[in-house]
Image (cartoon, grey):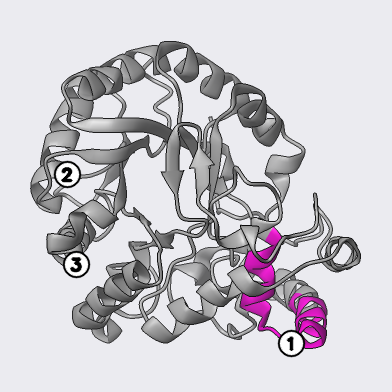
Amino acid sequence: MTTTDPTAQRAPRRLRDLSVSPLGLGCMGMSEFYGSADARDDEESVRTVHRALDLGITLLDTADMYGPFTNERLVGRAIGSRREEVVLATKFGNERRGDGTRRVNGRPEYVRAACDASLERLGVDHIDLYYQHRVDTTVPVEETWGAMSELVTAGKVRFLGISEAAPETVRRADAVHPVTALQTEWSLWTRDVESDGVLDTVRELGIGFVPYAPLGRGFLTGAITSPDDFRRNNPRFQGEAFAENLRMVDRVRAIADEKGCTPAQLALAWVLAQGPDVVPIPGTTKVSRLEENVGALDVHLTADDLARLDEAAPAGATAGERYPDMSSVRR
């Protein structure tokens, strides 16, 4: 970890050979998972995307399974005539079927069909960054990535990424076609990538890192006291684990107060400080929250600040698993 440079912090960052803004925008919550369906406001979401572009955010992140399928349409509508300003990322592999069931699907024929469907929903002729959302253990990753590489050759996709993959899987995929970015959860309360070989592997190979949930699924904002959406099934939001994690947030809030920023801005500044190859994608549905998040780019963290945050939220200190069944996540 190094101290942050407030001037350089707003400069573009590189995900391998792809240049993007230092902060991206996760669009998942605009369609599903966070909050109630009745509270969703597509027009406010479109305004949020437009404001993100106005503020210089170029990386927009979606997936076919968000909605399902509706989030890509929303993002496609939002970018409209501003397509050239956007580095557009989407994902395949978490297949949601008509009967309500889900499965991880990495079969080559599905890769090709999923990409064509995403292009149609997004209303674009190419995807800038196409992720394998989850690894299908029934299909060799080499077969999945062979099909993904064909999409690049066909001009449908520019760069390839992978999400929630284990170090050896990343190496095998990269041997087929260069992995531009790895997307995995990373924040002050989810730091396992620092010790499980994932971060070391991507840095050895020159792969960019895109942390999702850099605000701990909203927990690090300090605003969540009783989750009423999908988070209520997350072990970290239940019982004594929730109470223990709230104490961590209080420690982070105290440092934020001293720095004159919000807890969310401090948490994002910490992620940004992890290296120039790191591009977090906090999600929001509101312009005001977006503007707050972008303010993290102006938060300067000294070596002492980073040390204090390490003490306030040390690796491994968060209570509870981040998913109900962690065995099915990283493969």
What percent of the width, then of the height, locates residue 55? 40, 72
> Of callouts 2 and 1, which one flags the residue occurring earlier in the amino acid sequence?
2
User: For the residue carrying disc 2, how many other residues have a C-alpha within 10 Å: few (<14), some (14-19), or many (20+)?
Assistant: many
> Of callouts 3 and 1, which one flags the residue occurring earlier in the amino acid sequence?
3
Tell which tag, 2 or 3, sits nearer the viewer. 3
What percent of the width, then of the height, locates residue 218? 55, 73
Residue at 37% of width from left, 57% of height from top? 58
Q: Secondary structure at mark 2?
A: helix
**What span is in magenta?**
249-270
Q: Secondary structure at mark 3?
A: helix
Residue 301 visible in image: yes
Is residue 257 inside the magenta stretch? yes
| Left or right: 127 as drawn, with respect to 214 | left
User: For the residue carrying disc 1, how many other residues have a C-alpha within 10 Å: few (<14), some (14-19), or many (20+)?
Assistant: few
| Left or right: 273 as drawn, with respect to 294 | right
Residue at 50% of width from left, 14% of height from top? 172
Residue identified by numbered label 2: 118
